[in-house]
Amino acid sequence: MQIKFRTKKLEKICSEYAYSVKTYGPEMAVKINMRLDQISAADSVEMLIAGRIGRCHPLTGNLQKIYAMDLVHPYRLEFEKTADSICTVRIITIEDYH
């Protein structure tokens, strides 16, 4: 799958390891990189869900149509499918929504 980002800052966090370490710490930077690699390698979001890769799951309530994957507890990587292509996701945020 292809990956897009909601903001330039989020793209920088996800693509530059040093900036990711500075922002979230080394353990989180490794997890972010690992999750992005897993998303890139998958054929679809449904494949991530079916394989329970990173505990990928759809969110409910006011966050419908958004999916989340575990990072370092309690943080999650949130993303959505884009309308332009079935094989593209857009990373929305990294946050603790609990």
Image (spheres, helix red, strand yellow):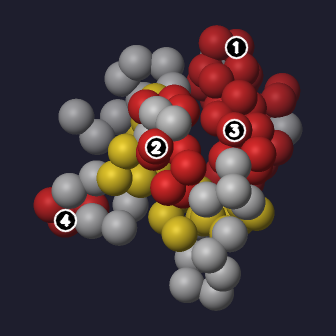
| 3 vs 4, front mark | 3
Q: Which mark is residue 79?
A: none
Q: Earlier in the sequence, mark 3 or mark 1?
A: 1
State yes or no: discs 1 and 2 in contact (Cβ < 8 Å): no
Q: CA distance from mark 3 to mark 2?
A: 13 Å
For label 3, the crowd category at 10 Å Cα-Cα, with few meaning under 14, some 14 to 19 and many 20 or more, is: some
Task: Please tell me which residue lies in front, 9 or 76.
Answer: 76
Q: Quadrant of residue 43?
A: bottom right
Residue at numbered disc 3: 38
Q: Quadrant of residue 85?
A: bottom right
- Residue 81 position, x and y percent, is 53, 69
Residue at numbered disc 2: 50
State yes or no: discs 3 and 4 in contact (Cβ < 8 Å): no
Q: Residue furthest top?
A: 27
* Residue 75 left/right relative to 2: left
Residue at numbered disc 1: 26
